[in-house]
């Protein structure tokens, strides 16, 4: 009886070993896949769209967690990967203030708001990231890409491409255009003004 139990146990053990050796190792996610995951993780329709000027800490400062605008989606996604765009943008603007827009009448940097303005992020990503083609081809947009748009009312907007596909086949965008931090099929809904990838 003991011999039979031993044989059965050995057979079960061999089967388990055989099954696990046939499993393929999971490929580690690259930076941009992790960035896509970070953006998806902050989807929250209850976030109130609030463009109010806030005084925030520096570095790693953030507006109240229940508030935000489109730029805060990008900022919060990168921060989950340990990259503080508040600090990165502020430091570059201090050294190269003349390269950034002066649309707000500023004569010096402001770490409370500079990184939360779409045109400033466009300059920063152009300087330190990859500038990619602005096309109408779905295949040209990959998870972790940053896209900027001009809306019909001429306001500017920014969001992040993620690795979820809409029923249309287009990649979904995580953004905040007034309905919270949401994931939607809006890639080609507005005029694309910029397409970037950034990895520190």
Image (cartoon, rainbow, N blue to C red):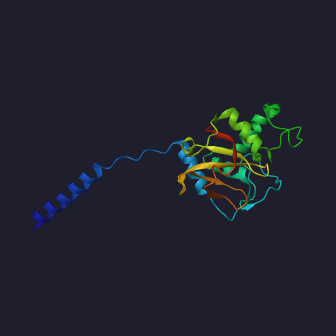
Q: Name the one closer to the observer, 3 or 131.
A: 131
Q: List x then y, in percent, for residue 44.
A: 64, 62
The percent position of residue 99, horizontal first and vertical second, equals 79, 32
Q: Which residue is depicted at the point 73% across and 44% down?
A: 86
Query: From this viewpoint, is residue 93 visible?
Result: yes
Q: Residue at x 61, y 57 (%)?
A: 183
Which residue is at a point 28% across and 48% down the rendered structure image?
21
154 displayed left or right of 73? right
Q: Quadrant of the N terminus?
A: bottom left
- Quarter holding residue 84: top right
For this rendering, which residue is in front, 53 or 45?
45
- In the rendered view, tell whether residue 180 sits above or below residue 138: below
Q: Nearer the viewer, residue 111 or 70?
A: 70
Q: Quadrant of the C terminus?
A: top right
Q: Position of residue 10 (x, y in %)?
A: 18, 58
- Residue 42 visible to an observer of this rendering: no
Q: In the image, 31: left or right of 28? A: right
Q: How many marks?
A: 0
The image quarter in which residue 50 lies? bottom right
């Amino acid at each position: 009886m003991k011999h039979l139990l031993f044989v059965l146990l050995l057979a079960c053990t061999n089967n388990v070993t055989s099954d696990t050796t046939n499993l393929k190792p999971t490929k580690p996610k690259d930076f941009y896949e992790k960035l896509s995951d970070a953006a998806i993780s902050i989807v929250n329709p209850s976030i109130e769209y609030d463009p109010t000027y806030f005084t925030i800490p520096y570095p790693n400062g953030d507006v109240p967690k229940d508030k935000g605008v489109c730029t805060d989606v990008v900022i919060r996604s990168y921060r989950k990967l340990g990259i503080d765009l508040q600090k990165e943008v502020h430091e570059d603007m201090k050294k190269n203030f003349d390269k950034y827009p002066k649309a707000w009448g500023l004569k010096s940097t402001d770490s409370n708001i500079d990184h939360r303005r779409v045109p400033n992020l466009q300059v920063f990503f152009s300087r330190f990231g990859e500038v990619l083609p602005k096309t109408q081809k779905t295949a040209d947009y990959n998870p972790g890409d940053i896209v900027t748009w001009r809306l019909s009312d001429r306001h500017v907007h920014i969001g992040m491409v993620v690795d979820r596909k809409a029923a249309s086949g287009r990649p979904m965008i995580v953004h905040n255009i007034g309905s919270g931090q949401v994931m939607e099929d809006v890639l080609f809904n507005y005029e694309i003004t910029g397409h970037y990838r950034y990895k520190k």
